[in-house]
Image (cartoon, grey):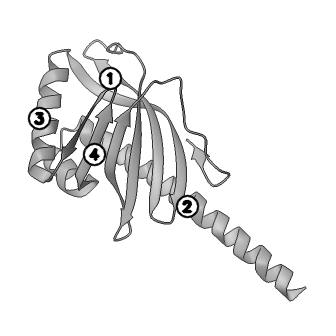
């Protein structure tokens, strides 16, 4: 009986830890979007990303080797989206998959909103972010744009948010 009780306690604790990690990973993505909308390039490049960061989508990919490369990439991105009258990016939903105690996949559906409050086409964008827990904090180590109709499946430890 004691063994069963101990096993049950360990199972519940593991589920709680995974749920806590999923909530923390989701919060990290929300923090990233807040920093992105505030144009906090240095904070993103040094505190939110953990370089090198692998970036991919479609038929292309590149590596942001260090914080300077990440900052330059962000500056170029702001210039491109400002030309479309970008005001902010809004998360529509997240799917968080906890792969291990230090690795999370966060699939993020979002929209870029213009100065008039309308989505900039395509209205829905989807990125799969790979987060690694380093020194107790979830950091982005890679992200990949993908077709918004395809979302990852998660084991029971994942959450949607």
Q: Which mark is residue 20?
A: 2
Q: Estimate the x, y position of residue 75 in percent, counting from the top left.
A: 11, 35
Circle 1: element type: strand
Circle 4: element type: strand
Side of 31 relative to 1 (left or right): left
Of circles 2 and 4, the one toward us is 4
Of labels 3 and 1, earlier in sequence is 3
Which residue is denoted by mark 4 in the rendering?
54
Q: Nearer the viewer, residue 124 or 116?
A: 124
Q: CA distance from mark 2 to mark 4?
A: 26 Å
Circle 3: element type: helix
Of circles 3 and 1, the one toward us is 3
Q: CA distance from mark 2 to mark 1?
A: 29 Å
Of circles 4 and 3, the one toward us is 4
Side of 126 relative to 67 (left or right): right
Query: Relative to 25, does residue 147 appear above or below in the rendering?
Result: above
Residue drawn at x 16%, y 37% is 74
Q: Estimate the x, y position of residue 93 in percent, counting from the top left.
A: 50, 34
């Amino acid at each position: 009986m004691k063994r069963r009780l101990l096993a049950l306690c360990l199972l519940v604790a593991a589920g709680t830890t995974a749920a806590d990690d999923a909530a923390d990973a989701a919060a990290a993505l929300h923090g990233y979007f807040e920093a992105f909308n505030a144009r906090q390039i240095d904070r993103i490049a040094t505190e939110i990303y953990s370089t090198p960061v692998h970036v991919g989508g479609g038929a292309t990919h590149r590596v942001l080797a260090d914080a300077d490369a990440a900052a330059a990439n962000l500056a170029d991105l702001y210039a491109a989206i400002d030309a479309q009258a970008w005001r902010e990016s809004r998360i529509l939903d997240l799917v968080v998959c906890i792969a291990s105690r230090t690795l999370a996949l966060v699939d993020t559906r979002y929209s870029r909103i213009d100065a008039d409050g309308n989505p900039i086409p395509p209205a829905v964008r989807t990125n799969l972010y790979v987060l690694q827990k380093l020194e107790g904090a979830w950091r982005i180590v890679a992200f990949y744009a993908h077709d918004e109709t395809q979302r990852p499946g998660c084991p029971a430890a994942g959450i949607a948010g």
